[in-house]
Image: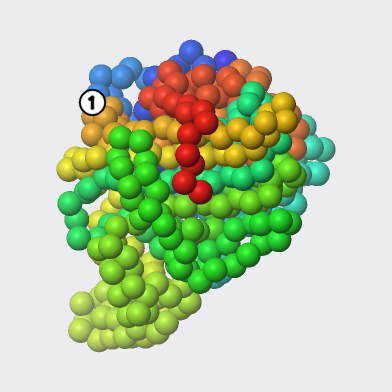
């Protein structure tokens, strides 16, 4: 039924690949392409070593290069391209999709390399082109963004006439037993969390200093955790799609040790994303040096633990959900919908930790919605633009069951 090309072979892609292989009735042909073909081949081997039988093709591609992408798309002819590389590649992959008649799905909004800036305008600008080409683009189909929007859409569809207050709460109560590590690509992660906070209230966006606003929130099966207000991309589409929202915020938990390291990293200049000159030894072994340009944050990424290697000793769980207050039949209603995911369960199934798992499973589920014809309409769409019901049903069956609480104290 479906021919899918996945770009990227990192943590999130590994989980998505396992899930695609577990659903071969939907995904009948599968190729993995990434910057390094050997990483794709290693992923295929990991899948076969777990006992799955699947014919998976692999290829090398530089996804920054539209011509290389076009060549690959024209030879494999995928119906859907699932972009699990980095946000920097969103637009080149969308361009190649348009040129070759492929549909598109990703898990993070476009970011220019030289500016840590999170907004959908660049990708929304492709709406007309995808519409005219009769192609579907599904943006931000991970957990948050992604499931967080499906949860909100589900609440709006079934339980509220008007949503007034929305708080997306993201807790990682796991321990990987490293002094400092990020749970997904370190460069992308550190760019995100060192940004100013931003939330929406009464029609306006309000900026805060980075991680300046925080409070204890109680997470199911976890307990209270200090949670920090951050900007997160899905707020932008949610307040547009649900205009009754008076306030929308996003919260993420961080431990004290993590924040101390982050502070040091910033104070040392290691989170800088501009190029600096560095006197480096020449590779010819002559002992001579030459000035090279490096980006400190990219260098830091090279020395930090790879998020793909954290799974084995990771204990604890994630708990991510939406706390919503609004009106149903004239009465005030509160609602909390969430998923808890244990890192060890994720590791046992896919070799990856829970953060990769909670992103990779929805990416597969979104792709499945596309192939089943349920999330297929020409244009560029966010997750809440589609029917949440079949998507949430799939998550229930594919390792990310969700739970609901009605009428509780949301703490917010
Ligand atoms: P990784 O760094 O582990 O994986 C990225 C993969 O893309 C790597 O295999 C990398 O190759 C490959 N890649 C990078 N640049 C290129 C390029 N130019 N051409 C081809 N391949 C390339 O990242 P994660 O798996 O942790 O994250 C993947 C995506 O998921 C990111 O966009 C991230 O922002 C997003 N994400 C979304 C979340 C959500 O809930 N919505 C949560 C977490 C992550 P190589 O291995 O050679 O470096």
Which residue is depicted at the point 31% across and 42% down? 223
Taking 205 as reference, is 338 left or right?
Answer: left
Residue at the farthest top position = 25
Taking 322 as reference, is 202 left or right?
Answer: right
The N terminus lies in which quarter of the figure?
A: top right
Please count the marks in the image. Answer: 1
Taking 111 as reference, is 264 left or right?
Answer: left
Residue 368 coordinates in the image, percent (x, y): 54, 23
**Depth order, front residue of 177/283:** 177
Tell me: residue 223, above or below residue 361: below
Residue 44 coordinates in the image, percent (x, y): 33, 31
Residue 67 coordinates in the image, percent (x, y): 61, 50
Check disc 1: other Cα within 10 Å, few if <14, some if 14-19, many if 20+. Answer: few
Q: Is mark 1 within 8 Å of ligand 1?
A: no
Which residue is depicted at the point 23% across and 34% down? 344
| Residue 67 appears anywhere in the view | no
Tell me: residue 27, above or below residue 245: above
Taking 392 as reference, is 200 left or right?
Answer: right
Q: Quadrant of residue 342?
A: top left
Residue 396 coordinates in the image, percent (x, y): 44, 21
Residue, disc 1: 49
Tell me: residue 269, above or below residue 242: below
- Applied colour scheme: rainbow
Which residue is depicted at the point 51% across and 71% down? 209
**Depth order, front residue of 375/159:** 159
Q: Secondary structure at mark 1?
A: helix
| Residue 373 appears anywhere in the view | yes
């Amino acid at each position: 039924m479906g021919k899918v090309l996945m770009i990227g072979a990192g943590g999130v892609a590994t989980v998505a690949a396992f899930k695609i292989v577990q659903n071969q009735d939907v995904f009948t042909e599968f190729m993995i392409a990434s910057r390094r073909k050997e990483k794709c081949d290693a992923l295929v081997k990991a899948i076969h070593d777990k006992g799955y039988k699947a014919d998976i093709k692999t290829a090398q591609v530089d996804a920054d290069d539209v011509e290389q992408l076009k060549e690959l798309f024209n030879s494999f002819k995928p119906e859907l391209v699932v972009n699990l590389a980095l946000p920097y590649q969103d637009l080149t992959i969308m361009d190649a999709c348009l040129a070759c008649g492929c549909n598109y799905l990703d898990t993070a909004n476009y970011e220019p390399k030289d500016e840590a800036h999170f907004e959908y305008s660049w990708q929304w600008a492709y709406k007309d082109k995808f519409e005219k080409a009769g192609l579907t683009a599904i943006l931000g189909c991970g957990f948050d963004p992604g499931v967080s929007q499906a949860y909100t859409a589900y609440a709006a569809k079934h339980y509220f006439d008007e949503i007034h207050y929305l708080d997306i709460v993201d807790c990682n109560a796991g321990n990987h037993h490293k002094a400092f590590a990020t749970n997904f690509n370190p460069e992308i992660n550190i760019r995100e969390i060192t940004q100013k906070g931003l939330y929406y209230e009464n029609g306006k966006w309000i900026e805060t200093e980075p991680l300046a606003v925080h409070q204890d929130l109680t997470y199911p099966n976890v307990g209270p955790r200090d949670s920090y207000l951050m900007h997160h991309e899905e707020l932008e589409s949610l307040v547009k799609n649900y205009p009754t929202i008076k306030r929308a915020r996003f919260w993420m938990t961080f431990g004290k040790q993590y924040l101390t390291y982050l502070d040091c990293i910033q104070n040392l200049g290691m989170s800088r994303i501009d190029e600096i000159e560095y006197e480096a030894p020449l590779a010819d072994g002559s002992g001579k040096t030459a000035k090279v340009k490096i980006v400190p944050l990219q260098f830091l990424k090279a020395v930090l633990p790879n998020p793909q290697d954290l799974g084995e000793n990771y204990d604890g769980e994630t708990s991510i959900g939406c706390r919503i207050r609004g009106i149903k039949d004239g009465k005030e209603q509160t609602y909390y919908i969430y998923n808890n995911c244990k890192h060890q369960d994720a590791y046992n199934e896919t070799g990856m930790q829970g953060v990769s798992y909670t992103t990779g499973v929805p990416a597969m589920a979104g792709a499945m919605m596309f192939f089943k014809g349920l999330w297929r309409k020409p244009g560029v769409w966010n997750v809440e633009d589609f029917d949440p019901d079949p998507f949430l049903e799939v998550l229930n069956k594919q390792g990310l069951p969700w739970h609901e609480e009605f009428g509780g104290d949301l703490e917010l």
